[in-house]
Image (cartoon, rainbow, N blue to C red):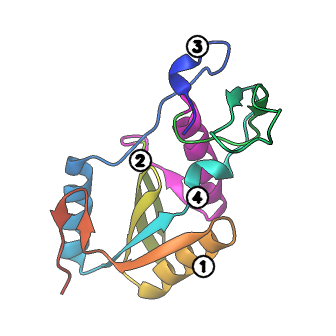
């Protein structure tokens, strides 16, 4: 974990906003999916923040045992975000948003954690909570295609049908 508490606004970072799913959003999406009898799946992106490049010059002390003997006073220049950097969440969501837009999703203007596709033959909704996603669609093949496309960019854990999220147990029939 990086020591983000030592970063200075305007010097090391400028934006920290990270949209994440909240309980009312989850409940609304689950209610919609239940009413429409849609499939609901969950996906986790492994090491999400490491997928984002840092444009600012940020240095950090090396973890104990990382450097060779005699190099202990050296620092590391970060090329990618790490958990703990102030801008990590914002940069990650920018990266993820670009992949969603490439897949044809629209970004909700009401809730920044929601992406959706609404075409004649394809209706899907995805909600993001940092590196976890819930995706729902009338057709399982659309969810399968979504996961396949994500794998082209990120290493994912396919958690299959949604059963547990944010302390909420979900049972799909």
The first of marks 1 and 3 along the sequence is: 3
Spatial CA distance of label 1 from label 2 is 21 Å
Q: List the residue tagged with mark 1.
A: 148
| Direction from residue 12 to residue 88 in the image, left or right | left
What's the mark number on residue 113?
2
Tell me which segment is drawn in magenta. 85-111
First along the sequence among labels 4 and 2: 4
The picture places residue 141, in percent across and down from the top left corner, at 49, 87
| Mark 4 vs 3, N-terminal side | 3
Q: Mark 3: which secondary structure?
A: loop
Q: How crowded is mark 2: few (under 14 residues within 10 Å), some or many (20 or more)?
A: many
Q: Do the residues labelled 1 and 3 touch (CB within 8 Å)?
A: no
Asked if residue 32 can be seen in this view, the reply is yes
Mark 4 or 3: the one toward you:
3
Residue 28, image x and y in percent?
A: 21, 57
- Disc number for residue 9: 3
- Are the residues flagged by discs 4 and 1 in contact, CB closer than 8 Å? no
**Residue 38: x percent and y percent?**
30, 79
- Is there CB contact under 8 Å for labels 2 and 3? no
Element under disc 1: helix
Asked whether residue 92 is drawn in magenta, I would say yes
Q: Is residue 39 left or right of residue 158?
A: left
Label ID, residue 100:
4
Q: Which residue is drawn at 68% across and 36% down?
A: 62
Is tag 1's residue or tag 2's residue first in the polypeptide sequence?
Answer: 2
């Amino acid at each position: 974990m990086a020591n983000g508490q030592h970063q200075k606004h305007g010097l090391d970072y400028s934006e920290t906003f990270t949209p994440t799913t909240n309980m009312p959003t989850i409940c609304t999406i689950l209610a919609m999916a239940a009413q429409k009898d849609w499939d609901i799946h969950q996906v986790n992106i492994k090491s999400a923040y490491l997928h984002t490049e840092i444009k600012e010059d940020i240095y950090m002390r090396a973890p104990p045992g990382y450097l060779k003997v005699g190099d202990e006073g050296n620092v590391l220049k970060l090329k990618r975000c790490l958990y703990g950097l102030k801008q990590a969440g914002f940069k990650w969501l920018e990266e993820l948003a670009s992949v969603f837009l490439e897949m044809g999703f629209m970004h909700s203007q009401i809730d920044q954690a929601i992406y959706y596709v609404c075409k004649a033959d394809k209706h899907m909704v995805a909600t993001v909570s940092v590196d976890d996603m819930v995706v729902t669609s009338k057709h399982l093949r659309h969810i399968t295609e979504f996961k396949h496309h994500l794998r082209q960019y990120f290493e994912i854990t396919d958690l299959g049908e949604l059963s547990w999220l944010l302390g909420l147990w979900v049972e799909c029939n």
